[in-house]
Amino acid sequence: IKNKTKEIAILKCLGLSNFSIRKIFFLTGFTIGFLASVTGIFFGVVFSLYIEEIRLFLSDVFNINIFPSDIYILEKMPSEISVSSLSIIFLFSILITALSSLFPAYSITKKNIMNCLKYD
């Protein structure tokens, strides 16, 4: 918001309403957060599905035994995907994204446009 204050002040001078500016900021932040949440869930599920193959690959490449079975009583890396946990994480991620997009959107519409144009 601090970097775009002058542009926002110009848009307000041209007649763009506060609601429209809030909508632009909210939708931009929410879209970025939504895509990040979907990408994170996707990569997390893929990583969980192939965790044993990744462990074996890293063991071969670096020539070390990751999680040796004589120390850790594991034959292979455990992985469990819970749809309920994934949905709760996704919903909280979307909620945090929405809240963190709303605060800057409301704060920018409270600024005085004359001061923004005068000092920038």
Image (spheres, grey):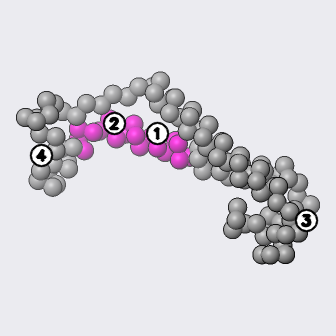
Identity, as a three-letter code, of the amino acid under mark 1: Ile
In this orientation, which residue lies closer to the viewer: 89 or 100?
Answer: 100
- Dividing the picture into quadrants, the one containing residue 79 is top left
| Vertical arrangement, residue 105 with respect to residue 84, above or below | below
Q: Is 17 colored magenta in this rendering?
A: no
| Vertical arrangement, residue 28 with respect to residue 87, above or below | below
**Structural distance between the alpha carbons of marks 2 and 1:** 10 Å
Identity, as a three-letter code, of the amino acid under mark 2: Ser
Identity, as a three-letter code, of the amino acid under mark 4: Asn
- Dividing the picture into quadrants, the one containing residue 21 is bottom right
Kindly identify which numbered label has been placed on residue 48: 2
Residue at the disc numbered 4: 65
Left or right of 35, for residue 63 = left
Q: Could you tell me what secondary structure mostly forms the magenta stretch? A: helix
Q: Residue at x 16, y 54 (%)?
A: 61
Sequence-wise, the earlier of marks 4 and 3 is 3
Nearer the viewer's eye, disc 4 or disc 1? 4
Point out the stretch of residues depicted in magenta. 35-54
Q: Look at the numbered discs 2 and 3 and tell me whether their residues touch, using CB distance below 8 Å.
A: no
Kindly identify which numbered label has been placed on residue 41: 1
